[in-house]
Amino acid sequence: SAVISQKPSRDICQRGTSLTIQCQVDSQVTMMFWYRQQPGQSLTLIATANQGSEATYESGFVIDKFPISRPNLTFSTLTVSNMSPEDSSIYLCSVDAADGPETYGYTFGSGTRLTVV
Amino acid sequence: ILNVEQSPQSLHVQEGDSTNFTCSFPSSNFYALHWYRWETAKSPEALFVMTLNGDEKKKGRISATLNTKEGYSYLYIKGSQPEDSATYLCAFERDSNYQLIWGAGTKLIIKP
């Protein structure tokens, strides 16, 4: 299955600033997914990023707050803009397994633990 | 509203004992049920993807069952070891649209 390198692994940021999280995959993948897990909550899908088109955002998430880039089939970034303490979460990127997520599930990055102060 | 519930929220188990926990999900528009293990400071790791009612899958000491008609799945761990300590997440996949709805997880702590 694919291997994802996600960075940074953690950061402490001032409110009002922005942080860009990167995910590099060791193989070409069609779809990349960005998730958030707020403390004590379930993983929540922020958006799905396809190469060459705008990301598709889930209800409650907007492009101005979470702009996403997908310049090629192995790389994506998520920016958390104008941060507030409520953005403190673990952010994860994910891709579908090369041979189909129905068999092997999804592969995840190691996560970015963000604390906004 | 689509809801995936996992219970218990956390579980302390003595090393060597067996344990199990539950994932409940909507029984309509079922496509697949995923189980993942998430150890601290690591990536969530896929354990099983289950699609057929009555299916049972096994990976070493860990196994899972699926009942799509009543909307639940059990994860079993036999002879728990310290390395089994992790949060176990289940996710419901609806209608093959690649969107997973996640439970909040069961945090398993194995006491030596």
Image (tube, coloured by chain):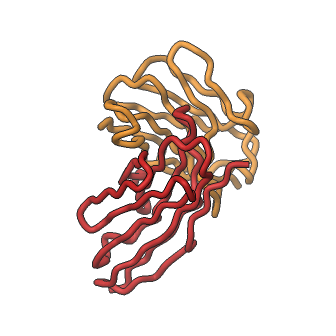
Chain colours: A orange, B red
The percent position of residue B21, horizontal first and vertical second, equals 48, 71
Which quadrant of the figure contains the N terminus of chain A? top left
Which quadrant of the figure contains the C terminus of chain A? bottom right
The quadrant holding residue B69 is: bottom right
The percent position of residue B6, horizontal first and vertical second, equals 57, 65
The percent position of residue A65, horizontal first and vertical second, equals 73, 34
The quadrant holding residue A20 is: top right
Residue at position x 48%, y 44% in the image = B32
Residue at position x 64%, y 38% in the image = A46
Q: How many marks?
A: 0
Residue A114 shows up from this direction: no
Residue at position x 34%, y 70% in the image = B84
Furthest residue in direction top, as rendered? A52
Decide which of B81, B92 is in the foreground and name it. B92
Left/right placement of residue A50 relative to residue B83 reads right
State whether residue B96 is above or below residue A16. above
Residue B26 shows up from this direction: yes
The quadrant holding residue B17 is: bottom left
Decide which of B24, B90 is in the foreground and name it. B24
Left/right placement of residue B112 relative to residue B32 reads left
Residue at position x 76%, y 42% in the image = A16
The percent position of residue B67, horizontal first and vertical second, equals 48, 58
